[in-house]
Amino acid sequence: MIISGLFLKANEIRVVTLEGERASHLLIAPKVTKFSLLKNPTQAEVVVFHTNLNAYLQHHRVDKVVINRRATTGQGAGGAGTFLMEGVILATCPCEVEFVHPATMRATDKRHSELKNGRPATVDLGKAYDLAFECLS
């Protein structure tokens, strides 16, 4: 199964795509790491965002997309940018979409951190990797 972890933050999506199982998985398309949408996008800009993201997902034959669950209240609550991108993904994604809570990722990291040998060093890509890893069998 090919799984893409999409870490939504501000007006960007960081992407990490994995294939395989937790014990043995491969990083796919390491050069493509983000898609962005302007702060106050026009309809045409949203269409371009949608087209680029879906082209990536179809090109790499992604079976499932995993997105970080946004906070709805309090510090770090999801802003308008992540809300808009999440809506576009939910409405137009050609594959299954699943949400994962940050606490779930932390618990998995504690149990299986030794299996995450391909985790990118940058924080946001690391979180996207964790999202994809979460749904590997």
Image: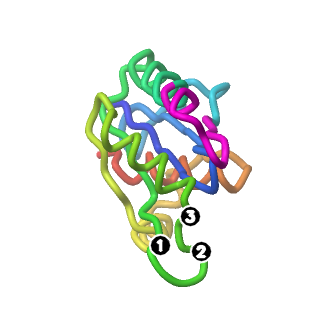
Q: Residue at x 49, y 65 (%)?
A: 109
Q: Secondary structure at mark 1?
A: loop
Q: Which residue is mark 2?
A: 76
Query: SS at mark 2?
Result: loop
Name which residue type carries label 3: Gly
Residue 46 is inside the magenta segment: yes
Q: Which residues are magenta?
A: 35-47
Q: Is residue 29 above or below residue 86?
A: above
> Is any part of residue 118 visible from this angle?
no
Residue flagged by tag 1: what amino acid is it? Ala
- Disc 1 to disc 2, C-alpha distance: 7 Å
Looking at the rendered structure, the kind of residue marked 2 is Gly
Q: Residue furthest left?
A: 96
Q: Which residue in the protein does label 3 denote?
A: 79
Residue under label 1, please give it. Answer: 71
| Residue lying at the far top of the rendered structure | 59
Residue for point 31% across, 51% down: 98
Residue sitting at x 39%, y 48%: 87
- For marks 1 and 3, the one nearer the N-term is 1
